[in-house]
Image (cartoon, rainbow, N blue to C red):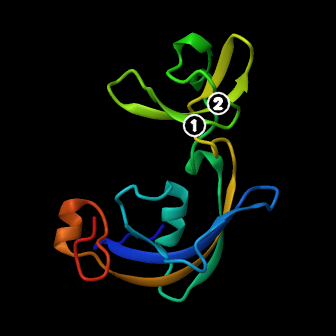
């Protein structure tokens, strides 16, 4: 494990594939993804692997489900009577915000629809999946005090919310 005493701002390109080799998304052809090390902005397994990389490095990184979006939690899959939903005409694949019970909203997706009930899943769509990233480090730099105090990277020219 590499320990950075001074957190970096890292910009990188990636292509994400699942265990079947299916391409899920890519940043190539767009702006690189930028994050502040240690801020929790990217999945833990990917961040840990990137810590050892420097500008120009290319690497294939496989992140186990537990270090990515976690394992599937069966208790987060629930069947709800249709009349309890704010929208009546839902279809498999729809996403919406639901009350997580702690005062926060949670994104859920519809996995099954019957005449009377809808099954919703609060797990991240990639939960339970090992993920592979082809990464290329675009740039690295030491984080500024302002970035450290705000807890995230700022874009070119400074503060960029």
Q: Is residue 142 above or below residue 152?
A: below
Q: Is residue 12 above or below residue 16?
A: below
Q: Residue at x 49, y 77 (%)?
A: 31
Figure quadrant of residue 91: top right
Q: Is residue 57 above or below residue 94?
A: below
The location of residue 73, given as percent across then percent down, is 61, 29
Residue nearest the viewer, comparing 9 with 64: 9
Farthest right residue in view: 20
Q: Residue at x 61, y 14 (%)?
A: 82
The location of residue 54, given as percent across then percent down, is 48, 84
Figure quadrant of residue 9: bottom left
Q: Which quadrant would the C terminus be assigned to in this image?
A: bottom left
Of the numbered discs in the image, which one, if any, rests on residue 38?
A: none
Farthest front residue in view: 89
Report the residue marked by disc 1: 95
| Mark 1 neighbour class, 10 Å CA radius: few under 14, some 14 to 19, many 20 or more | some
Report the residue marked by disc 2: 110
């Amino acid at each position: 494990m590499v320990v950075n005493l001074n957190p970096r701002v890292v910009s990188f390109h990636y292509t994400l594939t699942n265990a079947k080799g299916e391409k899920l998304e890519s940043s190539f052809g767009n702006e690189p993804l930028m994050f502040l090390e240690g801020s929790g902005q990217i999945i833990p397994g990917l961040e840990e692997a990137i810590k050892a990389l420097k500008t120009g490095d290319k690497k294939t990184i496989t992140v186990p489900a537990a270090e990515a979006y976690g394992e599937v939690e069966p208790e987060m899959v629930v069947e709800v009577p249709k009349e309890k939903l704010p929208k009546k005409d839902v279809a498999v694949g729809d996403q919406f915000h639901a009350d997580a019970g702690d005062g926060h909203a949670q994104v859920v997706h519809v996995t099954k629809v019957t005449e009377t009930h809808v099954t919703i899943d609060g797990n991240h769509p990639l939960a339970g999946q090992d993920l592979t990233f082809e990464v290329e480090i675009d740039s690295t730099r030491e984080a500024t005090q302002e970035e450290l105090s705000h807890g995230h990277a700022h874009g070119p020219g400074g503060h960029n919310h």
